[in-house]
Amino acid sequence: MRLSRRQALTSTAALAAAPLLGPAPAGGAASRAEKQAPSFYRYKVGDIQVTVVSDGRFTFPLEDSFITNAKKEEVNAALEKAFLPRDVFTIYFAPLVINTGGKLVVIDTGNGALAREKTKTNGMFAENMAAAGFDPRAVDMVVISHFHTDHVNGLLTADGTPAFPNAEVLVPATEWKFWMDDGEMSRAPAGRMQGLFKNNRNIFDAGLKRKVTPYEWGKEVAPGLLAVESVGHTPGHSSYVLSSGSGKVFIQSDVTNNPNPFATHPGWHAFFDQEPDVAEKTRRRIYDMVVTEKLQIQAFHYPFPGLAHLEKDGDGYRVIPTPWNPTI
Ligand SMILES: [Zn+2]
Protein backbone atom coordinates (compact mmCIF):
# COMPACT_ATOMS: atom_id res chain seq x y z
CA MET A 1 0.00 0.00 0.00
CA ARG A 2 1.34 3.37 -0.97
CA LEU A 3 0.51 6.51 0.97
CA SER A 4 -0.03 9.83 -0.67
CA ARG A 5 2.16 12.65 0.63
CA ARG A 6 -0.88 14.19 2.34
CA GLN A 7 -1.84 10.92 4.04
CA ALA A 8 1.76 10.41 5.14
CA LEU A 9 1.90 13.90 6.69
CA THR A 10 -1.42 13.40 8.45
CA SER A 11 -0.43 10.07 9.93
CA THR A 12 2.94 11.46 11.03
CA ALA A 13 1.15 14.30 12.80
CA ALA A 14 -1.27 11.86 14.40
CA LEU A 15 1.61 9.72 15.68
CA ALA A 16 3.44 12.75 17.04
CA ALA A 17 0.34 13.93 18.88
CA ALA A 18 -0.63 10.52 20.21
CA PRO A 19 1.63 10.44 23.31
CA LEU A 20 0.28 13.81 24.44
CA LEU A 21 -3.37 12.94 24.08
CA GLY A 22 -3.24 9.44 25.52
CA PRO A 23 -5.55 6.72 24.32
CA ALA A 24 -8.55 8.10 22.47
CA PRO A 25 -11.83 7.39 24.30
CA ALA A 26 -13.88 4.76 22.55
CA GLY A 27 -16.53 6.22 20.34
CA GLY A 28 -15.30 9.81 19.93
CA ALA A 29 -14.47 13.13 21.51
CA ALA A 30 -13.82 13.99 25.15
CA SER A 31 -16.80 15.33 27.09
CA ARG A 32 -17.33 19.08 27.35
CA ALA A 33 -17.67 21.07 30.55
CA GLU A 34 -21.18 22.30 31.38
CA LYS A 35 -20.12 25.13 33.70
CA GLN A 36 -17.69 28.03 33.91
CA ALA A 37 -15.12 27.95 36.73
CA PRO A 38 -16.34 29.74 39.90
CA SER A 39 -15.58 33.43 39.27
CA PHE A 40 -13.68 35.26 41.98
CA TYR A 41 -10.56 37.42 41.82
CA ARG A 42 -8.21 38.59 44.57
CA TYR A 43 -5.98 41.62 44.87
CA LYS A 44 -4.41 43.77 47.54
CA VAL A 45 -4.92 47.41 48.50
CA GLY A 46 -2.05 47.99 50.94
CA ASP A 47 -2.65 45.49 53.76
CA ILE A 48 -6.29 44.94 52.78
CA GLN A 49 -7.29 41.97 50.67
CA VAL A 50 -10.15 42.40 48.21
CA THR A 51 -11.98 39.46 46.64
CA VAL A 52 -14.29 40.34 43.75
CA VAL A 53 -17.00 37.66 43.60
CA SER A 54 -19.22 37.33 40.55
CA ASP A 55 -22.98 37.19 41.03
CA GLY A 56 -23.38 36.35 37.33
CA ARG A 57 -24.93 38.27 34.49
CA PHE A 58 -28.29 39.21 33.01
CA THR A 59 -28.81 39.40 29.23
CA PHE A 60 -32.02 40.86 27.81
CA PRO A 61 -33.40 42.26 24.54
CA LEU A 62 -32.46 45.89 23.94
CA GLU A 63 -35.64 47.98 24.04
CA ASP A 64 -36.14 51.51 22.71
CA SER A 65 -36.93 52.59 26.27
CA PHE A 66 -33.68 51.23 27.78
CA ILE A 67 -31.85 54.49 27.20
CA THR A 68 -34.33 57.32 27.41
CA ASN A 69 -32.39 59.95 25.44
CA ALA A 70 -30.79 57.89 22.67
CA LYS A 71 -32.36 55.95 19.81
CA LYS A 72 -32.00 52.18 19.68
CA GLU A 73 -29.99 52.46 16.45
CA GLU A 74 -27.48 54.79 18.15
CA VAL A 75 -27.16 52.32 21.02
CA ASN A 76 -26.70 49.45 18.57
CA ALA A 77 -23.95 51.44 16.80
CA ALA A 78 -22.16 51.96 20.14
CA LEU A 79 -22.46 48.25 20.96
CA GLU A 80 -21.07 47.25 17.57
CA LYS A 81 -18.19 49.69 17.97
CA ALA A 82 -17.31 47.80 21.16
CA PHE A 83 -17.58 44.43 19.32
CA LEU A 84 -20.73 43.54 21.28
CA PRO A 85 -23.85 41.96 19.74
CA ARG A 86 -26.70 44.18 18.52
CA ASP A 87 -30.21 44.15 19.98
CA VAL A 88 -29.24 42.61 23.33
CA PHE A 89 -27.71 44.05 26.47
CA THR A 90 -25.72 42.30 29.20
CA ILE A 91 -25.37 43.53 32.76
CA TYR A 92 -22.75 41.95 35.03
CA PHE A 93 -22.85 41.90 38.83
CA ALA A 94 -19.88 41.71 41.22
CA PRO A 95 -20.16 42.15 45.00
CA LEU A 96 -16.94 42.37 47.05
CA VAL A 97 -15.56 40.56 50.07
CA ILE A 98 -12.97 42.69 51.84
CA ASN A 99 -10.66 41.58 54.61
CA THR A 100 -9.79 44.82 56.33
CA GLY A 101 -8.17 45.23 59.74
CA GLY A 102 -9.35 41.83 60.94
CA LYS A 103 -12.94 42.47 59.79
CA LEU A 104 -14.60 40.54 57.00
CA VAL A 105 -16.74 43.03 55.08
CA VAL A 106 -19.13 42.31 52.19
CA ILE A 107 -20.10 45.20 49.91
CA ASP A 108 -23.46 44.57 48.19
CA THR A 109 -24.97 41.12 47.91
CA GLY A 110 -26.16 40.43 44.35
CA ASN A 111 -29.55 39.25 43.09
CA GLY A 112 -30.11 36.57 45.72
CA ALA A 113 -31.10 32.93 45.93
CA LEU A 114 -34.55 33.32 44.33
CA ALA A 115 -32.99 34.93 41.23
CA ARG A 116 -30.50 32.04 41.09
CA GLU A 117 -33.40 29.57 40.80
CA LYS A 118 -35.33 31.70 38.33
CA THR A 119 -32.65 33.04 35.98
CA LYS A 120 -29.85 30.44 36.22
CA THR A 121 -27.42 33.21 35.14
CA ASN A 122 -27.31 35.40 38.27
CA GLY A 123 -27.74 35.19 42.02
CA MET A 124 -24.46 33.26 42.10
CA PHE A 125 -22.78 35.31 44.85
CA ALA A 126 -23.38 32.73 47.61
CA GLU A 127 -21.97 29.77 45.69
CA ASN A 128 -19.00 31.72 44.29
CA MET A 129 -18.26 33.13 47.75
CA ALA A 130 -18.21 29.57 49.13
CA ALA A 131 -15.93 28.50 46.26
CA ALA A 132 -13.58 31.35 47.26
CA GLY A 133 -13.42 29.84 50.76
CA PHE A 134 -15.65 32.27 52.69
CA ASP A 135 -18.26 31.22 55.26
CA PRO A 136 -21.20 33.67 55.35
CA ARG A 137 -21.38 33.18 59.13
CA ALA A 138 -17.86 34.66 59.40
CA VAL A 139 -18.89 37.98 57.78
CA ASP A 140 -18.71 40.85 60.33
CA MET A 141 -20.32 43.62 58.26
CA VAL A 142 -22.40 43.94 55.11
CA VAL A 143 -22.24 47.41 53.54
CA ILE A 144 -25.01 48.27 51.07
CA SER A 145 -24.44 50.95 48.39
CA HIS A 146 -28.12 51.45 47.44
CA PHE A 147 -31.48 49.68 47.55
CA HIS A 148 -31.84 48.10 44.10
CA THR A 149 -32.64 44.39 43.88
CA ASP A 150 -29.25 43.39 42.45
CA HIS A 151 -27.54 44.89 45.52
CA VAL A 152 -29.86 43.95 48.42
CA ASN A 153 -31.65 40.71 47.52
CA GLY A 154 -28.63 38.59 48.48
CA LEU A 155 -29.14 39.77 52.08
CA LEU A 156 -31.67 36.93 52.43
CA THR A 157 -31.51 33.20 51.76
CA ALA A 158 -34.14 31.39 49.66
CA ASP A 159 -36.31 30.88 52.79
CA GLY A 160 -36.20 34.57 53.69
CA THR A 161 -33.76 34.41 56.62
CA PRO A 162 -30.61 36.57 56.89
CA ALA A 163 -27.85 35.23 54.61
CA PHE A 164 -25.15 36.75 56.87
CA PRO A 165 -26.58 35.91 60.31
CA ASN A 166 -23.71 37.38 62.36
CA ALA A 167 -23.14 40.55 60.35
CA GLU A 168 -24.02 44.15 61.12
CA VAL A 169 -25.83 45.52 58.03
CA LEU A 170 -24.81 49.09 57.17
CA VAL A 171 -27.02 51.18 54.86
CA PRO A 172 -26.73 54.76 53.55
CA ALA A 173 -28.79 56.97 55.90
CA THR A 174 -30.36 58.92 53.01
CA GLU A 175 -31.25 55.73 51.14
CA TRP A 176 -32.80 54.22 54.25
CA LYS A 177 -34.88 57.34 54.90
CA PHE A 178 -36.24 57.42 51.32
CA TRP A 179 -37.22 53.76 50.87
CA MET A 180 -38.61 53.30 54.39
CA ASP A 181 -40.75 56.45 54.21
CA ASP A 182 -44.43 55.49 53.95
CA GLY A 183 -45.29 58.79 52.21
CA GLU A 184 -42.66 58.20 49.50
CA MET A 185 -43.99 54.67 49.06
CA SER A 186 -47.59 55.84 48.70
CA ARG A 187 -46.57 58.40 46.05
CA ALA A 188 -44.42 55.97 44.03
CA PRO A 189 -45.52 55.46 40.43
CA ALA A 190 -47.08 52.07 39.68
CA GLY A 191 -44.83 49.45 38.14
CA ARG A 192 -41.10 49.45 38.70
CA MET A 193 -40.91 52.01 41.54
CA GLN A 194 -43.74 50.43 43.54
CA GLY A 195 -42.10 47.06 42.99
CA LEU A 196 -38.81 48.37 44.40
CA PHE A 197 -40.54 49.75 47.50
CA LYS A 198 -42.28 46.40 48.02
CA ASN A 199 -39.04 44.50 47.57
CA ASN A 200 -37.18 46.73 50.04
CA ARG A 201 -39.90 46.33 52.66
CA ASN A 202 -39.67 42.57 52.22
CA ILE A 203 -35.87 42.56 52.62
CA PHE A 204 -35.60 45.04 55.49
CA ASP A 205 -38.90 44.54 57.36
CA ALA A 206 -39.80 40.88 56.89
CA GLY A 207 -36.22 39.62 56.49
CA LEU A 208 -33.96 41.79 58.67
CA LYS A 209 -36.63 43.16 61.08
CA ARG A 210 -35.10 46.63 60.46
CA LYS A 211 -31.87 45.60 62.21
CA VAL A 212 -29.56 47.91 60.24
CA THR A 213 -27.06 50.67 61.02
CA PRO A 214 -27.49 53.79 58.84
CA TYR A 215 -24.20 55.46 57.83
CA GLU A 216 -23.29 58.98 56.71
CA TRP A 217 -21.08 60.06 53.80
CA GLY A 218 -17.57 61.31 54.60
CA LYS A 219 -17.19 58.76 57.39
CA GLU A 220 -15.33 55.44 57.61
CA VAL A 221 -17.93 52.66 57.61
CA ALA A 222 -15.32 49.91 58.13
CA PRO A 223 -11.53 50.11 58.68
CA GLY A 224 -10.07 51.80 55.55
CA LEU A 225 -13.48 52.13 53.86
CA LEU A 226 -14.70 55.72 53.43
CA ALA A 227 -18.30 56.28 52.25
CA VAL A 228 -18.71 58.85 49.45
CA GLU A 229 -21.89 60.52 48.19
CA SER A 230 -22.67 59.66 44.54
CA VAL A 231 -26.43 60.30 44.23
CA GLY A 232 -28.67 60.31 41.16
CA HIS A 233 -28.93 56.60 40.38
CA THR A 234 -30.92 56.53 43.66
CA PRO A 235 -31.45 59.28 46.29
CA GLY A 236 -28.85 57.77 48.67
CA HIS A 237 -26.53 56.04 46.20
CA SER A 238 -23.06 55.63 47.72
CA SER A 239 -19.54 54.87 46.56
CA TYR A 240 -16.39 54.26 48.61
CA VAL A 241 -12.69 54.95 48.77
CA LEU A 242 -10.81 51.94 50.09
CA SER A 243 -7.30 52.77 51.24
CA SER A 244 -4.44 51.22 53.15
CA GLY A 245 -0.84 52.52 53.17
CA SER A 246 -0.14 53.83 49.67
CA GLY A 247 -2.88 51.60 48.16
CA LYS A 248 -6.16 53.15 47.09
CA VAL A 249 -9.13 52.09 44.96
CA PHE A 250 -12.40 53.89 44.23
CA ILE A 251 -15.36 51.51 44.59
CA GLN A 252 -17.92 53.18 42.33
CA SER A 253 -21.05 51.00 42.80
CA ASP A 254 -23.49 52.13 40.03
CA VAL A 255 -21.98 55.48 38.99
CA THR A 256 -22.15 53.81 35.56
CA ASN A 257 -23.52 50.47 34.51
CA ASN A 258 -21.75 48.41 31.81
CA PRO A 259 -19.05 50.79 30.48
CA ASN A 260 -20.23 50.06 26.93
CA PRO A 261 -22.03 52.36 26.37
CA PHE A 262 -22.35 54.22 29.71
CA ALA A 263 -18.67 55.22 30.17
CA THR A 264 -18.20 55.93 26.46
CA HIS A 265 -21.50 57.92 26.44
CA PRO A 266 -21.84 59.42 29.95
CA GLY A 267 -24.71 61.64 28.73
CA TRP A 268 -26.94 58.65 27.99
CA HIS A 269 -29.63 58.08 30.60
CA ALA A 270 -30.64 54.53 31.44
CA PHE A 271 -34.24 54.09 32.64
CA PHE A 272 -32.97 52.82 36.01
CA ASP A 273 -31.34 56.15 36.98
CA GLN A 274 -33.98 57.63 39.30
CA GLU A 275 -32.84 61.24 38.76
CA PRO A 276 -31.10 61.04 35.37
CA ASP A 277 -29.70 64.60 35.26
CA VAL A 278 -28.25 64.28 38.75
CA ALA A 279 -26.87 60.84 37.89
CA GLU A 280 -25.13 62.26 34.81
CA LYS A 281 -23.61 65.15 36.80
CA THR A 282 -22.35 62.69 39.42
CA ARG A 283 -20.97 60.37 36.73
CA ARG A 284 -18.99 63.16 35.05
CA ARG A 285 -17.81 64.67 38.36
CA ILE A 286 -16.57 61.35 39.73
CA TYR A 287 -15.02 60.13 36.47
CA ASP A 288 -13.21 63.48 35.97
CA MET A 289 -11.84 63.16 39.53
CA VAL A 290 -10.78 59.54 38.93
CA VAL A 291 -9.05 60.50 35.66
CA THR A 292 -7.23 63.48 37.25
CA GLU A 293 -6.07 61.46 40.24
CA LYS A 294 -5.29 58.38 38.08
CA LEU A 295 -7.32 56.40 40.64
CA GLN A 296 -8.03 52.76 40.00
CA ILE A 297 -11.75 51.93 40.09
CA GLN A 298 -13.68 48.81 41.09
CA ALA A 299 -17.05 48.75 39.33
CA PHE A 300 -20.03 46.53 40.25
CA HIS A 301 -21.46 46.30 36.71
CA TYR A 302 -18.27 46.18 34.61
CA PRO A 303 -17.25 42.93 32.91
CA PHE A 304 -15.59 40.73 35.55
CA PRO A 305 -13.56 41.46 37.63
CA GLY A 306 -14.34 45.15 37.06
CA LEU A 307 -10.97 46.59 38.10
CA ALA A 308 -9.81 49.35 35.75
CA HIS A 309 -8.38 52.78 35.07
CA LEU A 310 -10.15 55.49 33.09
CA GLU A 311 -8.99 57.97 30.50
CA LYS A 312 -10.84 60.93 29.04
CA ASP A 313 -11.84 60.21 25.42
CA GLY A 314 -13.73 63.02 23.67
CA ASP A 315 -16.98 63.61 25.57
CA GLY A 316 -16.71 60.21 27.26
CA TYR A 317 -14.25 57.91 28.98
CA ARG A 318 -12.12 55.01 27.86
CA VAL A 319 -11.80 52.03 30.20
CA ILE A 320 -8.42 50.32 30.54
CA PRO A 321 -9.02 47.05 32.41
CA THR A 322 -6.27 46.12 34.89
CA PRO A 323 -4.43 43.00 33.66
CA TRP A 324 -5.45 39.77 35.40
CA ASN A 325 -2.78 38.89 37.95
CA PRO A 326 -2.38 35.11 38.41
CA THR A 327 -0.72 35.69 41.80
CA ILE A 328 -1.80 37.97 44.67
ZN1 LIG B 1 -26.87 47.79 40.19
Image: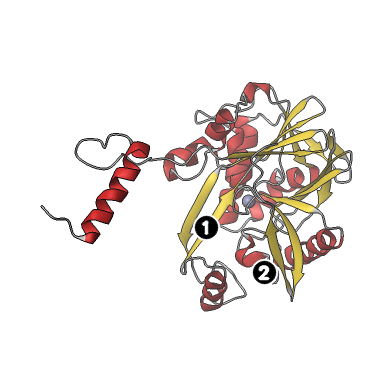
Query: Which x, y percent locates residue 280?
Result: 74, 66
Q: In the figure, 314 relative to 269: above or below?
A: below
Residue at numbered disc 1 = 90
Q: In the figure, 214 relative to 241: above or below?
A: above
Identify the residue at image location x=89%, y=45%. Answer: 218
Return the disc, 2 or 1, that comes first in the chain's sequence.
Answer: 1
Residues at circles 2 and 1 in contact by the CB criterion of under 8 Å:
no
Q: Which mark is residue 292?
A: none
User: Considering depth in this image, is 315 or 233 the residue closer to the camera?
Assistant: 315
Q: Can residue 30 be seen in this view?
A: yes
Residue at numbered disc 2 = 264
Query: Which x, y percent locates residue 251?
Result: 75, 48
User: Considering depth in this image, is 45 or 70 the residue closer to the camera?
Assistant: 45
Disc 1 is placed on an element classified as strand
- The picture quadrant where one finds residue 173 is top right
Question: Is 55 on the left or on the right of 268, as rendered?
Answer: left
Give the amino acid at mark 1. Thr
Q: How many labels does the image show?
A: 2
The CA distance from mark 2 to mark 1 is 16 Å
Q: In the figure, 37 relative to 61: above or below?
A: above
Sort mark 1 into few (<14), some (14-19) or many (20+) by Cα contacts within 10 Å: some
Q: Is residue 278 visible?
A: no
Give the amino acid at mark 2. Thr
Q: Farthest residue toward the left?
A: 1
Identify the residue at image location x=57%, y=73%. Answer: 78
- The picture quadrant where one finds residue 310 is bottom right
User: Considering depth in this image, is 51 or 156 the residue closer to the camera?
Assistant: 51
Query: Which x, y percent locates residue 139?
Result: 69, 26
Query: Which x, y percent locates residue 123?
Result: 52, 40
Q: Farthest residue toward the front?
A: 2
Which corner quadrant holds the C terminus? top right
Answer yes or no: disc 1 within 8 Å of ligand 1: no
